[in-house]
């Protein structure tokens, strides 16, 4: 616990801004829904937009934001681009958030 507190108290102003921006990204229902879909399996924009009953353009816009903040990553397979969560940290943030609200 002490080591974790040291990490928190040792953040500089820029890192605190970055952390605040990260939590802002998690503050959007659509982005949360997209990340929850991607936590289950890799998916393309078409499948995500169909699952959420949204336009491809709207989903692409949100994916661009998530990618910019390194919350999702993409890979190309021919003409298709598949998205997944960037790493286990993103999965863990989602899981901890769900755990917290379900307590």
Image (tube, rainbow, N blue to C red):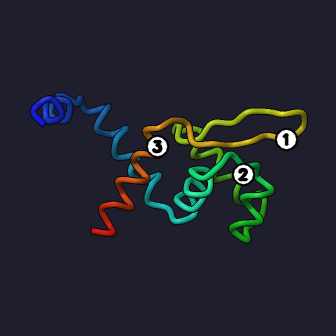
- Residue at 43 percent across and 60 percent down: it is 27
Can you identify the residue that label 3 sits on?
90
* First-in-chain label (1 vs 2): 2
* Label 3 environment density (alpha carbons within 10 Å; few <14, some 14–19, many ≥20): some
Label 1's element? strand
Q: Nearer the viewer, residue 3 or 58?
A: 3
**C-alpha span from label 3 to label 2:** 19 Å
- Rendered view: 99 above or below 19: below
Label 2's element? helix
- Residue at 76 percent across and 49 percent down: it is 44
* Label 2 environment density (alpha carbons within 10 Å; few <14, some 14–19, many ≥20): some
Indicate which label's residue lies in the foreground, 3 or 2: 3
- Residue 69: image x %, image y %? 51, 39
* First-in-chain label (1 vs 3): 1
Can you identify the residue that label 2 sits on?
60
**C-alpha span from label 1 to label 2:** 13 Å
Quadrant assignment for the C terminus: bottom left
* Label 1 environment density (alpha carbons within 10 Å; few <14, some 14–19, many ≥20): few
Residue 10 located left or right of residue 45? left
Residue 98 occupies quadrant = bottom left
- Rendered view: 100 above or below 42: below
- Residue at 47 percent across and 46 percent down: it is 91
Q: Nearer the viewer, residue 51 or 10?
A: 51
- Residue 100: image x %, image y %? 30, 62
Residue 37 located left or right of residue 23? right
Label 3's element? helix
- Residue at 14 percent across and 33 percent down: it is 9
Check residue 80 in the rendering and tell me which mark sits there, or answer none: 1
- Residue 19: image x %, image y %? 34, 41
Check residue 21 in the rendering and tell me which mark sits there, or answer none: none
């Amino acid at each position: 616990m002490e080591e974790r507190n040291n990490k928190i108290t040792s953040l500089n102003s820029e890192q605190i801004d970055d952390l605040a921006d990260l939590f802002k990204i998690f503050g959007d229902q659509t982005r949360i829904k997209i990340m929850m879909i991607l936590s289950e399996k890799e998916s393309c924009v078409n499948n995500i937009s169909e699952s959420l009953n949204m336009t491809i353009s709207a989903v692409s816009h949100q994916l661009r934001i998530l990618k910019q903040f390194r919350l999702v990553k993409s890979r190309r397979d021919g003409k298709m681009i598949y998205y997944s969560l960037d790493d286990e940290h993103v999965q863990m943030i989602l899981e901890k958030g769900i755990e917290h609200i379900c307590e």
